[in-house]
Amino acid sequence: MRQPKDFPPFLSQEAPSEVERMGLTWLVGAAIATAILWQFPGGDYILYPFTILATWFHEMGHGLMALMLGGNFQKLQIFSNGSGVASYSISSALGPIGPGLVAAAGPMGPPIAGAALILASRHFKTASLSLKILGGFLLFSTLVWVRSWFGLIAIPVLGLIILGVGLKTPPWVQGFTIQFLGVQACVSTYHQLNYLFSYTAGPLGLSDTAQMQRYLLLPYWFWGGLMAVASLVILVRSLQVAYRSQ
């Protein structure tokens, strides 16, 4: 039986409002549990695949923004400890705004991607298509940009798993998976909360928020706080839209 388009794919036609509340409650609970788990050392092991995916979103945000501004995305390195580095160049003609936008695109990459995945879950076709696009783009990025040994193994494995879900599972599984991945991407901001409020990134030099301070003037802690709040707002609003009944 075909389910109505106006509900997320994993919702049934029977008592839709009750099932909808159950699904939303589970996702919100998962988001809170994830944010808490990421604050403890053992949580990194439990959430390891989502950590790697969030790092991929983050570094792809840097690289794709550089491309959008007319620059080059040279390579992407992802390491087994969950860290990553995107190497890129942009035109100096953009002035300080260009580097500032590229720096911001990293931390904001996961919540923006997460919101897109959550919104895609409103319809069966877009949920399934989004899984296939995400899985395919993970594989594509491996061929074009990924240049670390760990990344060359982990990123295609994630891509194949997500593609498998998009191709071989029932619609309700696809709908729930795309929403769960979206929520995890949004919440991953709070995995890097210390990083958002740090001036340095260890041997890599300045943190993204410190780069924003350098090019956009306001202090790094302001940008860190702004992005933390923005990530939460993006998550809440995308869930509200996805679960809004007509």
Image (cartoon, helix red, strand yellow):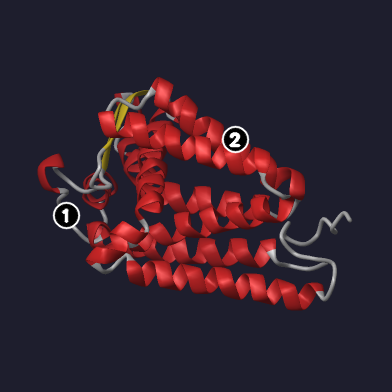
Would you identify the image quadrant in which residue 3 lies?
bottom right
Q: Nearer the viewer, residue 241 or 140?
A: 140
Q: Seen in the image, is 91 located left or right of residue 234?
A: left
Among the two numbered marks 2 and 1 on one chain, the one whose residue lies closer to the N terminus = 2
Which residue is found at the position 84% from the left and 67% from the top?
A: 13
Query: What secondary structure is marked by label 1?
Result: loop
Which mark lies nearer to you, 2 or 1?
2
Would you identify the image quadrant in which residue 176 lies?
bottom right
The residue beneath circle 1 is 199
Q: Seen in the image, is 33 located left or right of residue 131?
A: left
The residue beneath circle 2 is 133
The answer to whether any part of residue 181 appears in the image is yes
Q: CA distance from mark 2 to mark 1?
A: 35 Å
The answer to whether any part of residue 223 appears in the image is no
Which residue is found at the position 12% from the left and 48% from the top?
A: 202
Q: What amino acid is labelled 2 in the image? A: Ile
Q: Position of residue 112 (x, y in %)?
A: 50, 50
